Image (tube, grey):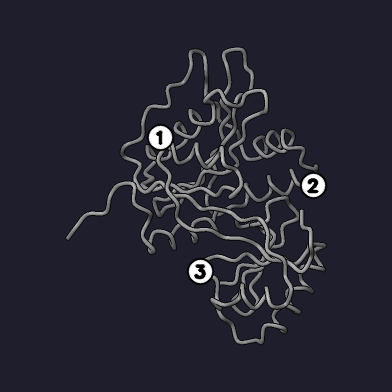
Protein backbone atom coordinates (compact mmCIF):
# COMPACT_ATOMS: atom_id res chain seq x y z
CA UNK A 1 0.00 0.00 0.00
CA UNK A 2 1.47 3.36 -1.05
CA UNK A 3 1.88 6.10 1.53
CA UNK A 4 0.28 9.52 1.07
CA UNK A 5 2.85 12.29 0.41
CA UNK A 6 3.27 14.62 3.37
CA UNK A 7 2.08 17.55 1.23
CA UNK A 8 -1.02 15.72 -0.04
CA UNK A 9 -4.46 17.19 0.72
CA UNK A 10 -6.23 15.78 3.78
CA UNK A 11 -8.39 12.73 3.31
CA UNK A 12 -12.14 13.13 3.11
CA UNK A 13 -12.40 11.74 6.64
CA UNK A 14 -9.96 14.31 8.02
CA UNK A 15 -11.66 17.13 6.08
CA UNK A 16 -14.97 16.09 7.60
CA UNK A 17 -13.40 16.08 11.07
CA UNK A 18 -12.02 19.56 10.41
CA UNK A 19 -15.49 20.80 9.47
CA UNK A 20 -16.90 19.38 12.71
CA UNK A 21 -14.04 20.89 14.72
CA UNK A 22 -14.64 24.28 13.13
CA UNK A 23 -18.34 24.12 13.96
CA UNK A 24 -17.57 23.26 17.57
CA UNK A 25 -14.97 26.01 17.91
CA UNK A 26 -17.27 28.69 16.46
CA UNK A 27 -20.38 27.78 18.47
CA UNK A 28 -22.12 30.82 20.00
CA UNK A 29 -24.49 30.59 22.97
CA UNK A 30 -27.35 31.65 20.67
CA UNK A 31 -28.11 28.64 18.50
CA UNK A 32 -30.92 26.21 17.82
CA UNK A 33 -31.83 23.29 15.55
CA UNK A 34 -34.69 23.40 13.05
CA UNK A 35 -35.38 20.07 11.34
CA UNK A 36 -31.71 19.16 11.08
CA UNK A 37 -30.44 22.68 10.30
CA UNK A 38 -28.19 24.41 12.83
CA UNK A 39 -29.18 28.07 13.27
CA UNK A 40 -26.52 30.34 14.76
CA UNK A 41 -27.78 33.71 15.92
CA UNK A 42 -24.85 35.61 17.44
CA UNK A 43 -24.95 39.41 17.03
CA UNK A 44 -21.18 39.43 16.37
CA UNK A 45 -19.24 40.10 13.18
CA UNK A 46 -18.19 36.53 12.31
CA UNK A 47 -20.63 35.13 9.74
CA UNK A 48 -19.90 31.56 10.82
CA UNK A 49 -21.58 32.44 14.14
CA UNK A 50 -24.69 34.01 12.55
CA UNK A 51 -25.71 31.70 9.74
CA UNK A 52 -27.48 28.45 8.93
CA UNK A 53 -25.46 25.25 8.68
CA UNK A 54 -27.58 22.70 6.84
CA UNK A 55 -26.33 19.51 8.48
CA UNK A 56 -29.20 17.14 7.62
CA UNK A 57 -31.68 16.87 4.79
CA UNK A 58 -34.69 17.35 7.03
CA UNK A 59 -38.34 16.59 6.30
CA UNK A 60 -39.86 20.00 5.61
CA UNK A 61 -40.09 21.46 2.09
CA UNK A 62 -37.38 24.04 1.41
CA UNK A 63 -39.82 26.94 1.35
CA UNK A 64 -41.17 26.02 4.78
CA UNK A 65 -37.65 25.59 6.18
CA UNK A 66 -36.58 28.99 4.91
CA UNK A 67 -39.73 30.63 6.29
CA UNK A 68 -39.07 29.23 9.76
CA UNK A 69 -35.42 30.24 9.63
CA UNK A 70 -36.29 33.70 8.29
CA UNK A 71 -38.54 34.30 11.29
CA UNK A 72 -35.80 33.23 13.73
CA UNK A 73 -33.18 35.48 12.13
CA UNK A 74 -35.58 38.41 11.91
CA UNK A 75 -36.38 38.02 15.60
CA UNK A 76 -32.64 38.19 16.32
CA UNK A 77 -32.25 41.26 14.09
CA UNK A 78 -29.98 39.40 11.66
CA UNK A 79 -29.98 38.85 7.88
CA UNK A 80 -30.79 35.33 6.75
CA UNK A 81 -27.52 33.66 5.64
CA UNK A 82 -26.85 30.06 4.63
CA UNK A 83 -23.33 28.60 4.74
CA UNK A 84 -22.62 26.15 1.91
CA UNK A 85 -19.92 23.50 2.30
CA UNK A 86 -19.11 20.18 0.57
CA UNK A 87 -20.95 18.55 3.49
CA UNK A 88 -24.20 20.55 3.18
CA UNK A 89 -27.47 18.59 3.07
CA UNK A 90 -29.29 18.36 0.78
CA UNK A 91 -26.34 18.35 -1.58
CA UNK A 92 -28.19 20.44 -4.15
CA UNK A 93 -29.12 23.17 -1.65
CA UNK A 94 -26.69 25.63 -3.26
CA UNK A 95 -28.33 25.14 -6.66
CA UNK A 96 -31.81 25.45 -5.15
CA UNK A 97 -30.94 28.75 -3.46
CA UNK A 98 -29.28 30.04 -6.65
CA UNK A 99 -32.47 29.24 -8.55
CA UNK A 100 -34.38 31.35 -6.03
CA UNK A 101 -32.09 34.29 -6.78
CA UNK A 102 -30.00 34.09 -3.61
CA UNK A 103 -26.62 35.83 -3.88
CA UNK A 104 -23.30 34.02 -3.41
CA UNK A 105 -20.50 35.76 -1.48
CA UNK A 106 -17.47 35.41 0.83
CA UNK A 107 -15.63 32.54 -0.83
CA UNK A 108 -13.48 30.96 1.87
CA UNK A 109 -10.74 28.34 1.82
CA UNK A 110 -10.21 25.83 4.58
CA UNK A 111 -6.54 24.86 4.77
CA UNK A 112 -5.01 22.01 6.74
CA UNK A 113 -1.59 21.13 8.06
CA UNK A 114 -1.88 17.38 8.07
CA UNK A 115 1.30 16.81 10.13
CA UNK A 116 2.64 18.81 13.06
CA UNK A 117 5.77 16.75 13.72
CA UNK A 118 7.96 18.70 11.28
CA UNK A 119 7.34 22.29 12.36
CA UNK A 120 10.31 24.63 11.92
CA UNK A 121 11.43 26.91 14.71
CA UNK A 122 9.56 30.24 14.72
CA UNK A 123 12.88 32.14 15.01
CA UNK A 124 11.64 34.97 17.19
CA UNK A 125 13.64 38.17 16.99
CA UNK A 126 15.70 39.33 19.98
CA UNK A 127 13.38 40.76 22.60
CA UNK A 128 10.18 39.40 21.03
CA UNK A 129 7.76 37.80 23.48
CA UNK A 130 4.59 35.77 23.16
CA UNK A 131 2.14 36.95 25.81
CA UNK A 132 -1.11 35.11 26.68
CA UNK A 133 -4.42 36.99 26.51
CA UNK A 134 -7.66 35.85 28.11
CA UNK A 135 -10.75 35.69 25.83
CA UNK A 136 -12.11 39.07 26.93
CA UNK A 137 -8.77 40.84 26.44
CA UNK A 138 -8.24 39.14 23.10
CA UNK A 139 -11.67 40.08 21.74
CA UNK A 140 -11.25 43.66 22.93
CA UNK A 141 -7.75 44.06 21.49
CA UNK A 142 -8.37 42.52 18.08
CA UNK A 143 -11.77 44.24 17.86
CA UNK A 144 -10.25 47.66 18.44
CA UNK A 145 -7.59 47.03 15.80
CA UNK A 146 -10.22 45.93 13.29
CA UNK A 147 -12.61 48.76 14.09
CA UNK A 148 -15.28 46.36 15.36
CA UNK A 149 -18.23 47.89 17.17
CA UNK A 150 -18.59 47.55 20.94
CA UNK A 151 -21.49 45.14 20.37
CA UNK A 152 -19.35 43.06 18.02
CA UNK A 153 -16.45 42.94 20.49
CA UNK A 154 -18.78 41.88 23.30
CA UNK A 155 -20.31 39.14 21.13
CA UNK A 156 -16.82 37.89 20.19
CA UNK A 157 -15.78 37.75 23.85
CA UNK A 158 -19.01 35.96 24.75
CA UNK A 159 -18.47 33.37 22.02
CA UNK A 160 -14.86 32.72 23.05
CA UNK A 161 -15.73 32.39 26.73
CA UNK A 162 -18.67 30.05 26.03
CA UNK A 163 -16.96 27.90 23.38
CA UNK A 164 -17.00 24.15 24.11
CA UNK A 165 -13.47 24.13 22.66
CA UNK A 166 -11.13 26.31 24.77
CA UNK A 167 -9.27 29.13 23.03
CA UNK A 168 -5.75 30.25 23.82
CA UNK A 169 -4.95 33.76 22.60
CA UNK A 170 -1.52 35.36 22.33
CA UNK A 171 0.07 38.67 21.45
CA UNK A 172 3.50 38.86 19.83
CA UNK A 173 5.29 41.94 21.12
CA UNK A 174 8.63 43.68 20.52
CA UNK A 175 11.20 44.40 23.20
CA UNK A 176 9.59 47.82 23.83
CA UNK A 177 6.09 46.31 24.14
CA UNK A 178 4.91 47.25 20.64
CA UNK A 179 2.16 44.88 19.49
CA UNK A 180 3.35 43.09 16.34
CA UNK A 181 0.77 40.31 15.84
CA UNK A 182 -2.21 38.59 17.44
CA UNK A 183 -3.51 35.07 17.09
CA UNK A 184 -5.22 32.26 18.92
CA UNK A 185 -5.82 28.56 18.61
CA UNK A 186 -8.69 26.32 19.66
CA UNK A 187 -7.63 22.79 20.59
CA UNK A 188 -10.21 20.05 21.02
CA UNK A 189 -9.77 16.58 22.45
CA UNK A 190 -9.73 15.18 18.89
CA UNK A 191 -6.16 16.33 18.24
CA UNK A 192 -7.28 19.12 15.89
CA UNK A 193 -6.01 22.66 16.47
CA UNK A 194 -7.68 25.55 14.66
CA UNK A 195 -5.89 28.87 14.12
CA UNK A 196 -8.26 31.82 14.48
CA UNK A 197 -8.25 35.61 14.29
CA UNK A 198 -4.63 36.03 13.18
CA UNK A 199 -4.07 39.76 12.81
CA UNK A 200 -1.03 41.96 12.16
CA UNK A 201 -1.31 45.75 12.61
CA UNK A 202 -0.75 47.65 9.38
CA UNK A 203 2.57 49.18 10.47
CA UNK A 204 3.94 45.73 11.38
CA UNK A 205 3.16 43.89 8.15
CA UNK A 206 5.68 42.34 5.74
CA UNK A 207 8.22 41.80 8.51
CA UNK A 208 7.66 38.08 9.11
CA UNK A 209 5.67 38.54 12.32
CA UNK A 210 2.65 36.52 11.13
CA UNK A 211 4.90 33.58 10.26
CA UNK A 212 6.63 33.70 13.66
CA UNK A 213 3.31 33.94 15.46
CA UNK A 214 1.63 31.10 13.55
CA UNK A 215 4.58 28.74 13.98
CA UNK A 216 4.68 29.58 17.69
CA UNK A 217 0.97 28.80 18.04
CA UNK A 218 1.29 25.54 16.11
CA UNK A 219 4.23 24.41 18.23
CA UNK A 220 2.31 25.27 21.42
CA UNK A 221 -0.70 23.28 20.17
CA UNK A 222 1.50 20.32 19.19
CA UNK A 223 3.09 20.34 22.65
CA UNK A 224 -0.44 19.99 24.07
CA UNK A 225 -1.24 16.98 21.89
CA UNK A 226 -2.45 18.43 18.58
CA UNK A 227 -1.73 16.17 15.60
CA UNK A 228 -3.34 18.25 12.81
CA UNK A 229 -4.17 21.92 12.30
CA UNK A 230 -6.66 23.86 10.21
CA UNK A 231 -7.65 27.44 9.47
CA UNK A 232 -10.08 29.44 7.35
CA UNK A 233 -8.96 32.24 5.04
CA UNK A 234 -10.73 34.44 2.52
CA UNK A 235 -10.20 33.23 -1.03
CA UNK A 236 -9.12 36.69 -2.18
CA UNK A 237 -6.50 37.18 0.56
CA UNK A 238 -3.58 36.10 -1.61
CA UNK A 239 -0.85 37.21 0.81
CA UNK A 240 -2.35 35.23 3.71
CA UNK A 241 -2.86 32.14 1.54
CA UNK A 242 0.79 32.35 0.42
CA UNK A 243 1.96 32.65 4.04
CA UNK A 244 -0.03 29.64 5.21
CA UNK A 245 1.09 27.52 2.26
CA UNK A 246 4.69 28.50 2.99
CA UNK A 247 4.42 27.08 6.53
CA UNK A 248 2.95 23.79 5.35
CA UNK A 249 -0.82 24.23 5.01
CA UNK A 250 -2.56 22.64 2.03
CA UNK A 251 -6.03 23.05 0.53
CA UNK A 252 -8.79 21.04 2.20
CA UNK A 253 -12.07 22.45 0.85
CA UNK A 254 -14.00 25.66 0.19
CA UNK A 255 -17.21 27.11 1.53
CA UNK A 256 -19.28 30.19 0.78
CA UNK A 257 -22.47 31.90 1.86
CA UNK A 258 -25.79 32.71 0.20
CA UNK A 259 -28.41 35.28 1.15
CA UNK A 260 -31.49 36.93 -0.30
CA UNK A 261 -29.90 40.28 0.41
CA UNK A 262 -27.51 41.78 -2.13
CA UNK A 263 -25.08 43.11 0.46
CA UNK A 264 -24.35 41.49 3.81
CA UNK A 265 -21.72 42.86 6.18
How many badges with numbers are in the image?
3
Instruction: Report crowding for label 3: few under 14, some 14 to 19, many 20 or more residues within 10 A (C-alpha).
Output: some
Q: CA distance from mark 3 to mark 1?
A: 30 Å
Q: Is residue 107 left or right of residue 223?
A: right
**Sequence-wise first label, 1 or 2:** 2
Secondary structure under tag 1 reads helix
Q: Which mark is residue 39?
A: none
**Sequence-wise first label, 3 or 1:** 3
Which residue is identified by label 3? 87
Q: Is residue 98 left or right of residue 261?
A: left
Q: Which circle, 3 or 2, is nearer the viewer? A: 3
Which residue is identified by label 2? 151
Image position, residue 198 (x, y; %): 58, 38
- Give the quarter of the figure containing the N terminus: bottom left
Secondary structure under tag 2 reads helix
Q: CA distance from mark 1 to mark 2?
A: 33 Å
Q: Which circle, 3 or 1, is nearer the viewer? A: 3
Image position, residue 31 (x, y; %): 67, 65
Q: Is residue 170 left or right of residue 158?
A: left
Amino acid sequence: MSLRPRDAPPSFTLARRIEDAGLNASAPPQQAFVDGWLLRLSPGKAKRARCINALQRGRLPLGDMLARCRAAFASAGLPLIVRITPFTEPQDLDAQLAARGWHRFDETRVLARVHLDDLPEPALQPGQRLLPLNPSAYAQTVGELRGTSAEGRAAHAERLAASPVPYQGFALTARDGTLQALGQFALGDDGLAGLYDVFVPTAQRRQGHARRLCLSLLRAAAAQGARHAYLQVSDDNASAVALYEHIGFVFAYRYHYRSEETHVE
